[in-house]
Image (cartoon, rainbow, N blue to C red):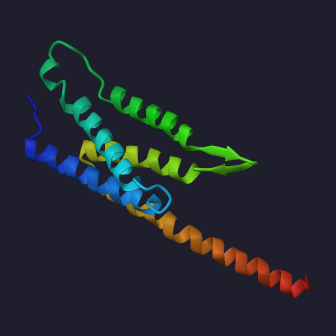
Amino acid sequence: MNHLLNEDMVIRLFLAVLAGTVMGYPHARYIKSATRIYAIVCLGSALVMLVSTWGFADLTPWINFDPARLSAQVIAGMGFVGAGIIIIRQGRVYGLPASATLWLTASIGLVIGLGWYFMAILAVFASWGTFLVYPLMKKLLRLRRRKARELRGE
């Protein structure tokens, strides 16, 4: 029988809390408890993946189980939660980045629960890359448009 050691479970859950906290940090200036929310989402996802992967190991001879079923429910549930975050007011959409990041955080928790640490770290860095690079790109585009207007004499 294959069993995951308690130390491995603790490491995975701790890393999930850490990754969730890091993912929630960019939203902390808009949402007071963002780091805590994202940490809990990532922890919950990792816990679900641990349970779905290892929780039924003793029942394997009698029951055929599919570990992907519980993780699929996490993804669907986070889509539902994310839809509740998105607000449309006066033709403008708010909350889309937070919703997408929360969904990604749940996915990272699932990956950590599987023990795929490198993929989780890569996803966190890629996410932070979007938080850092996209605002710079936006500023550069604004400057470029402004210079083009000045050259046209507007």
Residue 149 percent coordinates (x, y): 85, 81
Locate the C terminus by quadrant: bottom right
Viewer-side residue, 121 vs 101: 101
Task: Write the residue at 29% across / 44% down.
Answer: 43
- Residue furthest to the top in view is 62
Position of 99 with respect to 33 (left or right) is: right
Viewer-side residue, 112 vs 103: 103
Position of 149 with respect to 91 (left or right) is: right
Does 58 appear above or below 130? above
Q: Residue 21 sits in which quadrant?
A: bottom left
- Residue furthest to the front in view is 32
Task: Write the residue at 32% across / 45% down.
Answer: 40
Residue 96 percent coordinates (x, y): 58, 49
Task: Write the residue at 28% across / 41% down.
Answer: 46
Q: Residue 24 sits in which quadrant?
A: bottom left
Does 52 appear above or below 154? above
Locate the N terminus by quadrant: top left
Viewer-side residue, 57 vs 146: 146
Residue 22 visible in rendering: yes
Task: Write the residue at 14% across / 47% down.
Answer: 10
